[in-house]
Image: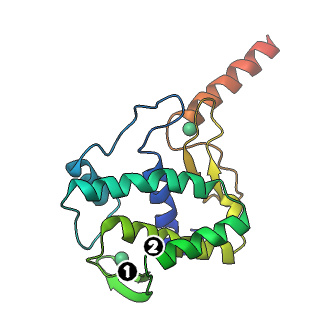
């Protein structure tokens, strides 16, 4: 855990959300094609509160993806602007809550606010933590060839380079082959 549990989780699911959409070398990728897919994604990340019911809500969540991608590429000043904009647009009103297995954490929207707004406000809140801690370099893009997936580096020594997909394995195999080739 680098930040608080809820901030770590938010940053991970923000990167995962961006990575459900079209990507470099995979322009047709769409892992949130419809409402059931979005609801399953919501369950996977243990979201509570109101559940989306319309295609428009799915569209609103999908529309966050390019925005997250753009935010990930910003420098510290830019991230400050993004965080403030997300919180203002979502009319964030932080409060402490406790539910399920989670201890005290912050919700900054009402539980019945539209899902896309709840996500964007949570991301805004998480960015506040990241910026205050001086840890903005933990927002990274995968170093794999032909991959621009987002990741959040929550490792102790900030060594994470690859997304959650196959990029890390591929890079290890390539490095191994290169070592073997130069040794032989
Ligand atoms: Zn909660
Ligand atoms: Zn990757």
Which residue occupies the extreme top position in the image?
A: 184
Note whether residue 178 is visible: yes
Position above or below: 178 against 150: above
Residue pictured at 29% horizontal, 54% vertical: 58
As helix, strand or loop, the secondary structure at mark 1 comes to loop
Q: Which mark is residue 153?
A: none
Q: Which mark is residue 109?
A: 1
Q: Which structural element holds mark 2?
A: helix
Relative placement, left or right, of 116 versus 179 is left
At x 46% / y 65%, what residue is drawn?
A: 9
Residue 88 or 106: which is nearer the viewer? Answer: 88
Horizontally, residue 76 falls left or right of residue 12, namely right
**C-alpha separation, residue under disc 2 versus residue under disc 1:** 7 Å
Residue 104 location (% of width, % of height) = 41, 85
Q: Point out the tag, 2 or 1, that comes first from the N-terminus.
A: 1
Ligand 1 location (quadrant): bottom left
Do the residues under discs 2 and 1 have CB atoms within 8 angstroms?
Answer: yes
**Relative to residue 86, is residue 129 drawn left or right?**
right
For this rendering, which residue is in front, 140 or 120? 120
Q: Quadrant of residue 81?
A: bottom right
Mark 2 highlights which residue? 121
Q: Is mark 1 within 8 Å of ligand 1?
A: no
Q: Quarter holding the N terminus?
A: bottom right
The location of residue 67, given as percent across then percent down, is 51, 55
**Label 2 neighbour load within 10 Å: few <14, some 14-19, many 20+:** many
In this image, 163 relative to 182: left or right?
Answer: left
As drawn, the residue found furthest toward the bottom would be: 95
């Amino acid at each position: 855990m680098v930040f608080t549990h809820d901030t770590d989780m938010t940053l991970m699911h923000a990167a995962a959300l961006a990575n459900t959409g079209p990507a470099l070398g995979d322009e047709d990728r769409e892992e949130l094609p419809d409402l059931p897919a979005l609801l399953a994604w919501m369950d996977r990340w243990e979201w509570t509160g109101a559940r989306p019911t319309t295609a428009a809500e799915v569209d609103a969540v999908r529309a966050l993806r390019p925005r997250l991608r753009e935010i990930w590429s910003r420098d510290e000043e830019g991230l400050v602007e993004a965080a403030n904009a997300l919180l203002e647009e979502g009319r964030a009103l932080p409060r402490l809550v406790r539910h399920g297995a989670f201890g005290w954490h912050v919700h900054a929207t009402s539980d019945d606010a539209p899902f896309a707004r709840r996500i964007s406000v949570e991301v805004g809140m998480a960015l506040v933590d990241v910026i205050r801690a001086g840890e903005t370099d933990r927002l990274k893009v995968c170093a794999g060839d032909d991959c621009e997936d987002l990741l959040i580096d929550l490792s102790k020594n900030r060594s994470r380079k690859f997304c959650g997909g196959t990029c890390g394995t591929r890079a290890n195999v390539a490095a191994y082959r290169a070592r073997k080739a130069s040794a032989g």
